[in-house]
Amino acid sequence: LKKRVHPRVYFDGQFIIRAGTVGMSMFFIQTGQVSVVSPSGQHLASLQAGGFFGECALLSSTTRIAHVRAEGCVEVMELSRQELAELMTWYPVLLTSLVSSSRQRIQLVNPQQQVPKMGPKTAVAAVAGELKEKLQLASTGAAGAA
């Protein structure tokens, strides 16, 4: 896992993720604390070292459901969608844990919202679609240059 994550540092008040944006990665908190805030501004939770966030958008292939803001200096490890999809195929227990927490978090943000379909096929399909699109663009560019 250590080879697949990338260290990032955020300072007090900086947004790490914003609701409504496309999620391309998730984060694991190494040091510090973050606040999770609903799009309407309601404080939903505080997460500390050992916690994680950003998985909802990756697992459901939807946009981010909440803002996450650094409270003081925060060090996180970032894991991309593609790297997460690969890890889930090797470690199904990781998938089970992430899906469970993601469902709870979606319900916390919006209790009336139906929880979208989640799982390895959804996440892997999203990554496969992105790779296919990149390959098509690359082959189109190569064909146009020939």
Image (cartoon, helix red, strand yellow):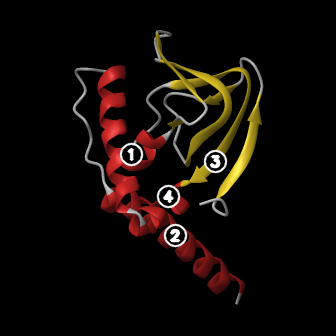
Residue drawn at point x = 73 percent, y = 47 percent: 7
**Few, some or many residues within 10 Å of mark 1 (<14, 14–19, 20+):** some
Q: Please, what secondary structure does the residue beneath circle 3 have?
A: strand
Residue 1 in the image: state x and y as whole percent: 59, 60
Q: CA distance from mark 3 to mark 2?
A: 20 Å
The amino acid beneath tag 1 is Leu
Instruction: Please report whichever mark, 3 or 1, sits nearer to the chain's N-terminal start.
Output: 3
Which residue was labeled with disc 4?
A: 84
In the displayed structure, 36 sits above or below 77; it is: above
Q: Nearer the viewer, residue 125 or 90?
A: 90
In this view, the mark in front (4 or 2)? 4
Q: Amino acid at mark 4?
A: Leu
Residue sitting at 25 percent across and 20 percent down?
A: 111
> Image check: 133 left or right of 142?
left
Q: Earlier in the sequence, mark 4 or mark 2?
A: 4
The residue at which mark 3 appears reads as 78
Q: Is residue 127 above or below residue 17?
A: below
Q: Which mark is residue 131?
A: 2
Q: Disc 1 designates what residue?
A: 98
Residue 58, position in %: x, y? Answer: 44, 48
**Label disc, if present, on residue 74 of the rendered structure:** none
Examine the image and state in which quarter residue 143 appears.
Answer: bottom right
